[in-house]
């Protein structure tokens, strides 16, 4: 076992150096595609074999493992419930989306919504129960939206409390419920401010709601603006 441990340490060091070199070579989307074509065939199969050998449900857990390492959080080894747990044990749902420069880094942060064939009166309680399970429904961070470029570098991060996301879906008008099984919080990234306006306004709403006497009025105003596509200008 000692030989295995030493080999793992050596491979880890070599892989970290290779990763740094790959990142250095991938400065643009075009360069990234070129590098992938050049080395992808040699690396992809063995990397996939290694990952699937060591990590259960690897296709679902890789982004969670990366974030957990950076934040010192814990990955939920199950495929249901929260994705991560912070250092206090609070549940966190992680949504990661990759975008390309040519599409203004458009993201898709899809939240699963119960069966569209059901009535909203049935779907909403099911959705709220799910939100509480995934986020805890408290004032702690319950959701993290991470936007990445095609080189897998983080370009924007938005965090919301579980309580706020719970309230968001609680106040979501019936006619805003998606006709499919997903609700998308994503949008394109502004070239001017390099931020995601919809999520910027959503973060501002979360801050305003904390001190509001009538939060439902703020949610109603937000949804009206969302419907009429008014959440497009830079906040700052």
Image: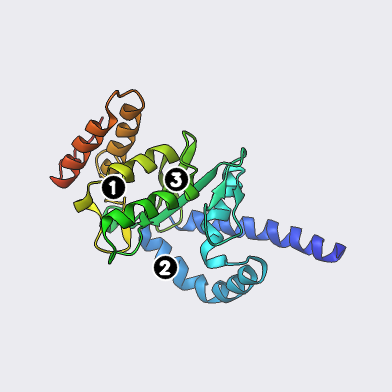
Rendered location of residue 28, percent (x, y): 38, 56
Residue at the disc numbered 3: 144
Residue 189's mark? 1
Residue nearer the viewer, 2 or 15: 2
Question: Which of pointers 2 and 1 lies earlier in the amino acid sequence?
Answer: 2
Rendered location of residue 41, percent (x, y): 52, 76
Q: Secondary structure at mark 3?
A: strand
Q: Looking at the image, can residue 107 be seen?
A: no
- As drawn, is 6 to the left or to the right of 148? right
Residue visible at 64% across and 60% down?
15
- As drawn, is 61 to the left or to the right of 9? left
Q: Distance between the Cα atoms at labels 2 and 1?
A: 24 Å
Closer to the camera: disc 2 or disc 1?
1
Q: Taking 47 as reference, is 120 above or below it?
A: above
**Looking at the image, do the residues carrying marks 2 and 1 touch, with CB atoms under 8 Å apart?**
no
Q: Secondary structure at mark 2?
A: helix
Residue visible at 28% across and 64% down?
180
Rendered location of residue 33, percent (x, y): 40, 66
Residue nearer the viewer, 132 or 222: 132
């Amino acid at each position: 076992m000692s030989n295995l441990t030493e080999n793992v340490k050596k491979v880890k060091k070599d892989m970290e150096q290779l990763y740094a070199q790959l990142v250095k070579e991938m400065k643009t989307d075009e360069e990234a595609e070129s590098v992938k074509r050049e080395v992808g065939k040699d690396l992809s199969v063995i990397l996939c074999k290694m990952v699937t050998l060591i990590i259960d449900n690897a296709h679902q857990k890789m982004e969670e493992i990366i974030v957990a390492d950076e934040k010192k959080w814990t990955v939920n080894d199950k495929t249901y419930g929260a994705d991560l747990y912070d250092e206090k044990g609070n549940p966190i749902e992680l949504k990661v989306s990759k975008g390309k420069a040519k599409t203004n880094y458009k993201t898709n942060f899809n939240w699963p919504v119960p069966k569209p064939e059901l009535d909203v009166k049935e779907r909403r309680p099911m959705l709220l129960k799910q939100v509480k399970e995934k986020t805890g429904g408290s004032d702690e961070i319950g959701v993290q939206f991470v936007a990445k470029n095609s080189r897998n570098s983080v370009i924007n991060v938005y965090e919301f409390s579980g309580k706020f996301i719970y309230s968001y879906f609680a106040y979501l008008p019936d006619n805003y419920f998606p006709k499919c099984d997903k609700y998308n919080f994503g949008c394109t990234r502004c070239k001017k401010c390099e931020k995601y306006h919809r999520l910027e306004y959503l973060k501002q709403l979360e801050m305003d709601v904390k001190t509001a006497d009538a939060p439902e009025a703020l949610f109603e105003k937000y949804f009206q603006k969302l419907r009429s596509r008014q959440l497009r200008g830079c906040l700052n």
